[in-house]
Image: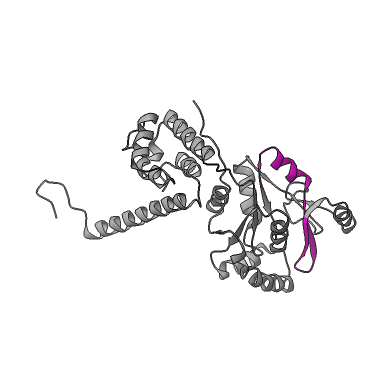
């Protein structure tokens, strides 16, 4: 079928698919705006993501819609800001020039500082066995160097590929007892009725004192202990996409025998039931996406590259 203009008319099925895609995109952008408006996600983190992924959801947001989602910015303030920043209202976040990105970043940062908003410096990441806490934490360590990933001490043996001092401090029971007695651990617990884990406190205190953000990847008991001594900590619960996927991951990594797998799965059911104790929940369907969401929740302020 051809229109009078001579241009072919897309098949009906294509128009329907395009319509569904457009609706999905609008809903995704609306979700981002709602997160910014509610304070669940910082405007600075949205700008950073738009810079890194200009064709993503954040990158395709109009700068006008983005600014209007920021608390206390109405239409008048939005237009004044765009004039001052020399940014066209027609621009999308992912299409901003380098100088425009820097100016917008500085504008948002100054507003956050004036309103007394400060990034959460201590974040605890916990979740059931085999959910991928270690994998997500490793991704954050490799891609977000501004975050200090705390290294826990444990009495269990290293798994294949794990490095002492990087993944864990692997210690024996005597050394673990000494650390507990000396008050060197922020928290400690026995996990899966087998091995002990603990978080060395000195590196965390030093990092927080210097203004760095710290991520603790620990178990449920440890998360509760940290909250009791540091109530300002933000707790994030990492979830699997489904129970079936959690079982698949546990069995697939092949690091425990059948009896230990069953014990860990039983513990996982108990741990999943405690997710409402946490401030936020993140589903680990994609390691990169889950890591980005965790960092977003830390409100890390990474300035875009200057010219």
- Which residue is at 48% across, 35% downward? 105
- Confirm whether residue 60 shows in the render: no
Quarter the N terminus occupies: bottom left
- Total residue callouts: 0
194 in the magenta segment: yes
Tell me: residue 296, above or below residue 97: below
- Confirm whether residue 63 shows in the render: yes
The percent coordinates of residue 245 (x first, y second) are 57, 66
| Magenta segment boundaries in residue numbering | 187-214
Tell me: residue 31, above or below residue 118: below
Describe residue 1's horizontal placement relative to residue 220 as left or right. Answer: left
Which residue occupies the foreground of this view, 119 or 139?
119
- Which residue is at 22% across, 59% downward? 12
Which color scheme is applied? one colour
The percent coordinates of residue 80 (x first, y second) are 36, 34
The percent coordinates of residue 72 (x first, y second) are 43, 44
Which residue occupies the foreground of this view, 205 or 286?
205
Which residue occupies the foreground of this view, 141 or 214?
214
């Amino acid at each position: 079928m051809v229109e009078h203009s001579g241009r072919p008319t897309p098949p009906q099925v294509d128009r329907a698919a395009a319509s569904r895609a457009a609706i999905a995109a609008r809903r995704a952008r609306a979700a981002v705006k709602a997160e910014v408006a509610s304070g669940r996600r910082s405007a600075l983190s949205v700008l950073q993501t738009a810079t890194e992924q200009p064709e993503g959801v954040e990158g395709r947001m109009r700068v006008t819609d983005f600014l209007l989602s920021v608390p206390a910015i109405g239409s008048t303030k939005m237009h004044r800001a765009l004039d001052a920043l020399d940014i066209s209202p027609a621009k999308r976040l992912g299409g901003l020039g380098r100088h425009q990105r820097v100016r917008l970043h500085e504008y948002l940062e100054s507003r956050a500082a004036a309103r007394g908003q400060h990034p959460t410096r201590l974040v605890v990441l916990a979740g059931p066995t085999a959910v991928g806490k270690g994998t997500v934490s490793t991704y954050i360590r490799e891609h977000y160097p501004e975050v200090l990933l705390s290294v826990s001490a444990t009495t269990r043996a290293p798994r294949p590929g794990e490095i002492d001092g990087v993944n864990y401090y692997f210690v024996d029971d005597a050394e673990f007892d000494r650390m507990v007695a000396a008050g060197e651990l922020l928290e400690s617990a026995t996990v899966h009725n087998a091995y002990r884990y603990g978080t060395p406190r000195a590196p965390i205190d030093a990092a927080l004192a210097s203004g760095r953000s710290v991520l603790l990847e620990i178990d449920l008991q440890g998360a509760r202990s940290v909250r009791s001594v540091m109530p300002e900590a933000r707790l994030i619960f990492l979830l699997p996409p489904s129970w079936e996927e959690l079982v698949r991951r546990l069995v697939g990594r092949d690091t425990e025998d059948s009896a230990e797998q069953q014990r860990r799965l039983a513990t996982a059911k108990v741990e999943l039931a405690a997710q409402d104790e946490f401030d936020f929940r993140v589903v680990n369907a994609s390691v990169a996406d889950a890591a980005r969401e965790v960092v977003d929740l830390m409100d890390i302020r990474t300035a875009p590259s200057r010219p």
